[in-house]
Image (cartoon, rainbow, N blue to C red):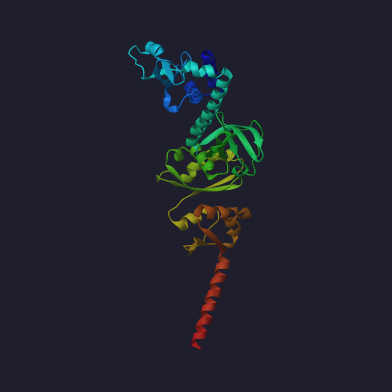
Amino acid sequence: MQENILQMINQLSKEKGVHPSFIVNAIKEAIREAAKKYYKAKDIVSLDFDERTGEVIVLVKKKVVQKVSNPEKEISWEQARKLNPNVKIGNIIPVNASAEILGRISAQTAKQIIFQKVSEAEKLYIYNEFYPKIGTLVNGVVRRFDNDSVIIDLEKAEGILKRKERPANESYNRGDRVKAVIIDVLKNSKGPQVILSRSDNLFLKRLMELEIPEIADGTIEIKGIARLPGERAKVAVYSKHKDVDPVGSCIGVKGGRIGAILKELKGEKIDIVQWSPSLEEFVKNTLSPAKILSVRRLDEKEKKLEVVVPESQLSVAIGKKGQNVKLASKLLGWQLEIKTSEEKMKEMGEILSANNERGSDGKD
């Protein structure tokens, strides 16, 4: 049994990729469970495992008696004296009951219990390994597909990339290498579920931290991200140092830095815009390359802005399928009402005319 246990530890350690001490703790728990079938928890003094020899040592409380009538709770005075020459009848002493416990369970049963405990401990180990990594990038390999989810092999666990967490323009094949961000780790009866995303704003943020040193070291700060995953994104950046150009640093020489990110995003376009504490200035930067004539706050409570552009710039400001204005609104946190200068002049003319009419009515 001892030799078998040592072999099992080495085998499981290699198979699960965990330290032997992890398996030993599972074995201790398994033996403890077995011991509880024959002894009350309060009667189990200690449980130890010799990692060198594979010996299990379970000490239980037994009462010293002249004649044993209940072997599970009693030990003869004659046997007790071999453990402690000064023992007296009526004393409660710790006795090694390992042979009794292990003798009652077959090697196969012991193996089943140990495997069960190792499985439970492994689930907890994986959860504790990945839960602190929420928000970080991971690399994996596509192993299979489960309904609308892509299952990613992360070596120690499987990651789940659901349909809603991946851009519509992306497709995958078995064996593809995939980079994603961990957005959650859920406990499940089958084991922890590591939830991944490539469509979350955090994924783009982590990619930028990876490719742009000034963001990684805090010189440049990402103030906000708005995405239409797989299509287009806008990122507002700010430099804490006046001599560092935040937009230029993100783009890189000949677009080298942003190019690496675009490649990972598989065609999603990115607009890098300079953040400004001035809302009006920030609006102009965010709607770039459209030229903006004026920005006016319509409703502070509802967060609505009026943006006036030249007639020739209306389609540029709105963008293809309305993408530019949609992303700008997301990034700013304000609803944008875009008007041409002609529309604004007409509107002002109507207001002026109405005021004049009211003035004329007053004179009559």
Q: Evaluate whether residue 354 shows in this view.
A: yes
Looking at the picture, does residue 243 appear above or below residue 84? Answer: below
Q: Observer-nearest residue: 237 or 244?
A: 237
Residue at the extreme bottom of the image, as rendered? 364
- 34 vs 318: above or below: above
* Residue at point 57%, 53% (across, down): 324
Residue at 51% across / 53% down in the picture? 286
Residue farthest to the left? 86
Q: Position of residue 200 (x, y in %)?
A: 55, 44
Left or right of 345 on screen, residue 40: left
Please say whether residue 252 is visible from this viewpoint.
no
As drawn, 204 above or below 281: above
Q: Nearer the viewer, residue 151 or 359?
A: 151
**Corner quadrant of residue 161:** top right
Q: Residue at 61% across / 45% down in the picture?
A: 164
Q: Position of residue 309 (x, y in %)?
A: 55, 61
Q: How many marks on residues?
A: 0
Residue 126 in the image: x percent, y percent? 52, 31
Name the residue nearer the viewer: 280 or 334: 334
Place of residue 39 in the rendered image (x, y in percent of width and height, measured from the top left): 47, 24
